[in-house]
Amino acid sequence: MDYVLAVKSGIYGHQGAYLAYQTAQALLEAGHQLRQIFFFQEGVSNAQKQVDPASDEFHLLQHWQALAQQHHIPLHLCISAAQRRGVVEENLAEGFTLAGLGEFSQAVLTADRLLTL
């Protein structure tokens, strides 16, 4: 099956973003396809290159990047939500792309399922 994953939880402070990452891994390991991972609302914080967790914490940003690179998954960020939260091109982590709802809608229309976490 083809999935689109929408992440609305911030990178730290809540379990949602990490759960979304685990879900993405599980889908891929089960042989499913991820057309896109779309970050919106507080989820845009997952794409800030200034994220610097303590050495004993899970570095979620690096794991999103590795997952996307390994499986050729676009990491799209809602441009409106990003701008409202100060996430702009200058502080966007490598591998993430600012995108509009058009790209998200197109991916959802061609996927079998949409999961939002």
Image (spheres, rainbow, N blue to C red):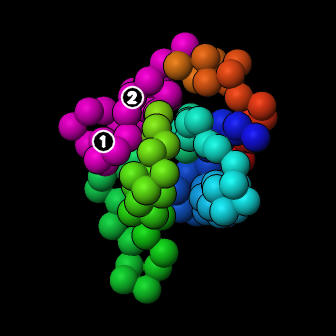
Residue range corresponding to the magenta coloring = 77-102
User: Please, what secondary structure does the residue beneath circle 2 have?
Assistant: strand
Q: Is residue 47 above or below residue 109?
A: below
Location of residue 113 (image quadrant) = top right
In the picture, measured across the screen, residue 98 lies left or right of residue 27, that is: left
User: Please, what secondary structure does the residue beneath circle 1 have?
Assistant: loop
Q: Looking at the picture, how far across and down is residue 21, in whole percent?
A: 60, 58
Q: Would you say residue 85 sits in the magenta stretch?
A: yes
The residue tagged 2 is 98
Q: Nearer the viewer, residue 73 or 89?
A: 73
Q: Looking at the picture, how far across and down is residue 111, in whole percent?
A: 71, 28
Badge 1: residue crowd in 10 Å (few <14, some 14–19, many ≥20): many
Q: Nearer the viewer, residue 13 or 32?
A: 32
Kindly indicate whether the residue at mark 1 contacts the one at mark 2 (C-beta within 8 angstroms). Answer: yes
Res 117 label: none
Residue 101 at least partly seen: no
Instruction: Please name the amino acid that badge 1 sits on.
Output: Leu
The residue tagged 1 is 92
Q: Residue at x 46, y 33 (%)?
A: 77
Q: Would you say residue 83 sits in the magenta stretch?
A: yes
